[in-house]
Image: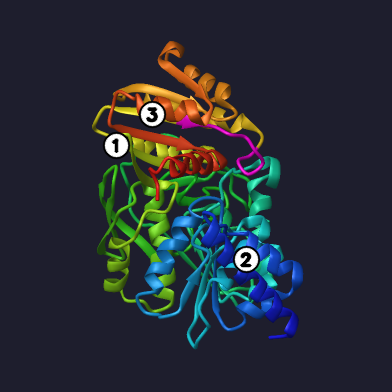
Amino acid sequence: MSLKSTIAKNAGKITRYLLTKFTNGGSSLPGKIALSIDKNLLRNLAKNYDVIVITGTNGKTLTTTLTTNVLSKKYKNVITNRTGSNMKQGIVGAFLNAPRSTKGAIAVLEVDEGSLKNVVSELQPKLFVHTNIFSDQLDRYGTTEKIYDLLADAAREVPEAAIIANGDLPLFNSQTLPNAQKFFGFDTDIESGDKTKEDAQCPKCSHTLEYHHYTYANLGDYYCPSCGFKRPELDYKVTSVQELNVTHSTFQLDNDTYTLHNAGIYNIYNALAAYSAGRFFDVSPPDIKDAFLTNERVFGRQEVIIAYDKKIILNVVKNPVGLNQVLNLVKLEKEPFTLVALLNNRPADGVDLKWLEDTNFESLADLDIEKIITGGIAVDAMTDRLVTAGFERENIDAAGSLESVIKSIENAPTTQIHMLATYTAMLEIRKALIEKGHIK
């Protein structure tokens, strides 16, 4: 490592130490400072690692955590950007946090789709894991096809890297890539209660795709009746879903039973992606089972927070497909509950709120919701959307500010609370609850 790189690395480490000692920490600033000193630092930090890049619109953070836990069962030196800071400075920060690299070191890195082009040549990954692509922040990325172009172009930069992709998504089978590819998906029909299947067009001839079975959105065993385009053969499979609960799921992967303490069909996909990466790196099924059982909940992803004698289940939402899957999870709730919906439209959330029109809040109409609380900088839009979904305006507490939201939570009539929040709203409500001592 050059003198400049050494200085940059030490500056980043000192910054991380000071942030940890005197504040609540910070996941991107150390990397930002280090890169300001040496713009080529990432290449030097990553060169001794087998790098796994996990990318896609939904599920990156949990898939990264699960994959890290799975690989840690076999490999001693596995690092990750666990906080979800998935742009270049956050990725540098993951290496700054790492112990001295040794033989067999692995870096499991969540990477933002738009950041791939900035890091892939320096990371030289051994494996890409492509989770999915749904309409997400289209004011930033444009179409889903353009998002996939970002992933495909990055893969072409490192043709020796393998790809493990969600075979149930038609886009991931739409381009010819030089990389070796494996696919995961559902090899079983499910009763998910999801009636929001999207029409999908064949990427080869534009005819409407049909499905032998589907899971949600446009995912499933698709085929084109016009040109013969169809789902690729699956290398890793969900072969049955045995239990869907508000707190966990039990399912079979390649005919072997697993339990995950994160609920929802969408999280079974995340577990399947992590399982696939684990098998690619020769981790045994018993070790993967154990990793799933010991998995901690990732902040903002079915995170359980105890505050004011209430049990708050917090889920971050950012696009229609993801939100609708969380709503399907909420529908598994058997007890009366309070619904909290926090909506921001800052750039990190997506400024355009038209995506709310494609959500299925109507599906909650028959649930035992004793109170609804709305908040965030776009509180009026959130409240209006719930009214159009059939909820009475006078029964919605449009709390607005964080302080008002927290006060309303404290006075909520139920002990069970389901909270949905866009990304920056999730960070803000967590910070407020940390300051009040409810989150350590």
Please tell me whether mark 1 or mark 3 is closer to you in this view: 3
Measured as percent of width and height from the top left, residue 396 is found at 44, 18
Q: Nearer the viewer, residue 319 or 338?
A: 338
Q: Give the labeled residue for mark 2.
A: 15
- Which three-letter amino acid code belongs to the residue tagged 3? Ile
Q: Give the labeled residue for mark 3.
A: 409
Q: Secondary structure at mark 1?
A: loop
Q: Which residues are magenta?
A: 341-350
Q: Is residue 344 magenta?
A: yes
Q: Give the labeled residue for mark 1.
A: 332
Measured in 3D between alpha carbons, the distance from the residue under mark 1 to the one under mark 2, in whole angstroms, is 44 Å
Residue 239 in the image: above or below residue 420: below
Measured as percent of width and height from the top left, residue 325 is found at 42, 41
Measured as percent of width and height from the top left, residue 206 is found at 63, 46
Residue 367 in the image: above or below residue 217: above
Q: Secondary structure at mark 3?
A: helix
Outermost front residue:
22
Q: Main secondary structure of the magenta part?
A: loop
Q: For the residue carrying disc 2, how many other residues have a C-alpha within 10 Å: few (<14), some (14-19), or many (20+)?
A: many
Residue 94 in the image: above or below residue 336: below
User: Upstream in the sequence, badge 1 or badge 2?
Assistant: 2
- Which three-letter amino acid code belongs to the residue tagged 1? Leu
> Which residue shows up at 62% across the image and 59% down it?
28
Measured in 3D between alpha carbons, the distance from the residue under mark 1 to the one under mark 3, in whole angstroms, is 21 Å
Please tell me whether mark 1 or mark 2 is closer to you in this view: 2
* Quadrant assignment for the N terminus: bottom right
- Report whether residue 390 is seen: no
